[in-house]
Image: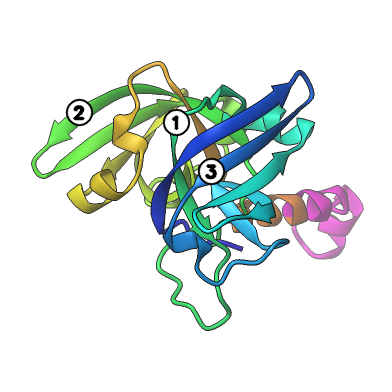
Amino acid sequence: MFTGIIEETGTVCRLVQTPHQCRLVLTARKVLEGTKIGDSIAVNGVCLTVTDLTENSFTADVMPETLRRSSLGYLKAGSTVNLERAMAANGRFGGHIVTGHIDDTGTIRSMQPEGNAVLVIISASPKLLRHVVEKGSIAIDGISLTVAKISHSDFTVSLIPHTGEETTLLRHRPGEIVNLETDVIGKYVEKLMQRRSDDVTMELLQKNGFC
């Protein structure tokens, strides 16, 4: 589990890709501290398993499902990525619950300065937007952000200067793809409510005085 508070940015130093899989080698510093083979590191919000380690880099395999669901297939040597280690049991919960399992990708529509912040508008599918709520949380490339506004085709977040400087989001340009993960709690609530609604019948409503 992650919190969406990016620890550092790293660089893709090598990428071996076939049509159905990918192996990433990334340079990093902070996220390597205390890390062992088999540990999890979120790369642009995608939970990956460390398969090899050196003093200044780690390697991770990316399976086909992850390539289909995320933007990792667009990475190339020299790309900068957001990095976060899995949350320690005694750590602070600075962001929100982030699983590292990407729901879908979105497209950056525009970036607009607003005072000391930058408004970023991202278009997304209706299927994803149904789980996005105003003032709720969303992870964009692994960054925990608060939704400022939502429409039928996109949503808006606002970045303070610190977030803009410490992550990759403002380095993107309109038209580029980002990874999106909605709040896992909302998805579980929806699933449970669907199950409950299947059990509601006219007979049950009448029995309990609703008809």
Residue 56 spot, x, y in % from top left:
49, 54
The reply to whether discs 1 and 2 touch (Cβ–Cβ < 8 Å) is: no
Residue 126 shows in this picture: yes
Given this view, does label 2 or label 3 mark the residue nearer the observer?
3
Residue on which the image places disc 2: 112
Say whether disc 1 or disc 3 marks the residue closer to the N-terminus: 3
Percent coordinates x, y for residue 130 in the rendering: 57, 37
Q: Residue at x 67, y 56 (%)?
A: 189
| Disc 1 versus disc 2: nearer the observer | 1
Judge by depth and name the residue closer to the eye, 23 or 135. Answer: 23
Which residue is located at x 81 percent, y 65 percent?
Answer: 208
CA gap, disc 1 and disc 3: 9 Å
Image-based side of 47 in relation to 77, left or right: right
Say whether residue 149 is magenta. no
Residue that mark 1 sits on: 79
Secondary structure beneath disc 3?
A: strand
> Where residue 26 is drawn, which disc sits there?
3
- In the picture, the quarter occupied by the N terminus is bottom right
Q: Position of residue 32 (x, y in %)?
A: 52, 62
